[in-house]
Image (cartoon, helix red, strand yellow):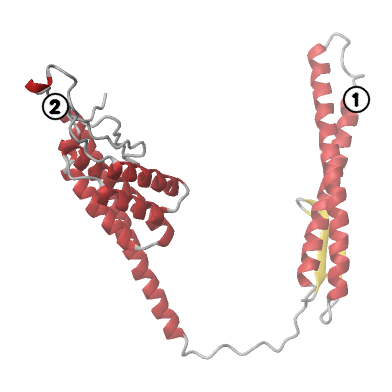
Amino acid sequence: MRRHRIPGLRVGTFLGALALVIPRPTVARAAPSPDSGGGPATAEAPASAEPLDDAQRLYNLGRAKFETADYAAAIELWTEAYAIVPDTADGNQVKVLLIFNIATAREKAFDVDRDPAQLRQAKILLGNFEASIDAIYVEGDEAEAERHKVQQRIAEIDARLAAYEQEQRDGAGDDHDDHDDQGEPPPPASTEPTSSGRGLIIGGAVAAGLGVGGLALMAAGLGMGAKANDISDLAPDDIDGRRDRFDRGRTGNALALAGGIAGGVLVVTGAVLLGLGVRKRQRGGRTALVPTIVPQGSGLALRGRF
């Protein structure tokens, strides 16, 4: 189990001190003086807890900002907390974990503002954290495991920086190409009249053709169901044959229902689109929707000049 020298501090690969509890200074009591007659000892003046209270408050505010994706504010608050933590043995370990959190927030901030400086600063902070791992972990195996995780984080940052720089180079090349193309004159505008109804006509023809296919599927399903209902050729004790015939009947009914619904909707939709498209055409040749028979089946074909 991972153990640290400061109670309440936790470090993880993603967000090291998200449950950071800044330790309060202990109060040492003086030994009773000889003249006191064994009376109660007087306490030494405790170290001021106000800086630590302020640091904990700033940390909690920064955590709320981090969890709501306001990474810039989290970085600012945690940096303020870092500045007021006293330079004591315990305080320095708290500062190390704050550094880890700030590095994580900077990685997240890059996802928002795409500023590569965020990643470069995060890399520096993680390097500082790596150098302080031995001061946080008591057990050497845990320290080595955490060091390996931090090194992986640094390698990931290097990869993200390389990818960002490659994107910038690619973007600069595209901008250069666009600048070179500005000298070429634009192509002359076409003087041929456009047909605003062409798309509607084509779409209507396609929908109508699919609708005819759906109706054909309905007819096939009805035929299959009708054949399945005729069991006169089966022996009375042919249970398997009757069951197979009933299954085919159910399949035929399903095909007929699906084909009828889809075919009807598509035929109506196609007819409406065709009517709108033909009406919108201002110029051009005539169009006609005629039945067609092809090796794969029957349907509707659009004939005309575009």
- Name the image quarter holding residue 251: top right
The residue drawn where x is 32% and y is 65% is 165
Choose mark 1 or mark 2, whichever is in front.
2
Identify the element where label 1 is drawn: helix
Task: Name the residue nearer the viewer: 198 or 244.
Answer: 198
How many marks are shown on the rendered structure?
Answer: 2
**Quick check: marks 1 and 2 in contact, CB under 8 Å?**
no
Q: Which labelled disc corresponds to residue 30? A: 2
- Name the image quarter holding residue 141: top left
Task: Name the residue nearer the viewer: 160 or 10.
Answer: 10
Q: How much space separates mark 1 and mark 2, taking CA atoms?
A: 105 Å
Task: Name the residue nearer the viewer: 216 or 182.
Answer: 182
Q: Residue furthest left?
A: 34
Tag 1 residue: 229
Residue 292 in percent (x, y) is at: 84, 59
**What is the quadrant of the N terminus in the image?**
top left
The residue drawn where x is 81% and y is 66% is 302
The residue drawn where x is 75% and y is 50% is 296
Q: Residue furthest top?
A: 237
Which amino acid lies under the numbered mark 1 shown in the image of this protein?
Asn
Q: Sequence order check: which comes first, mark 1 or mark 2?
A: 2
Residue 10 in percent (x, y) is at: 30, 34
Which amino acid lies under the numbered mark 2 shown in the image of this protein?
Ala
Residue 119 in percent (x, y) is at: 31, 57
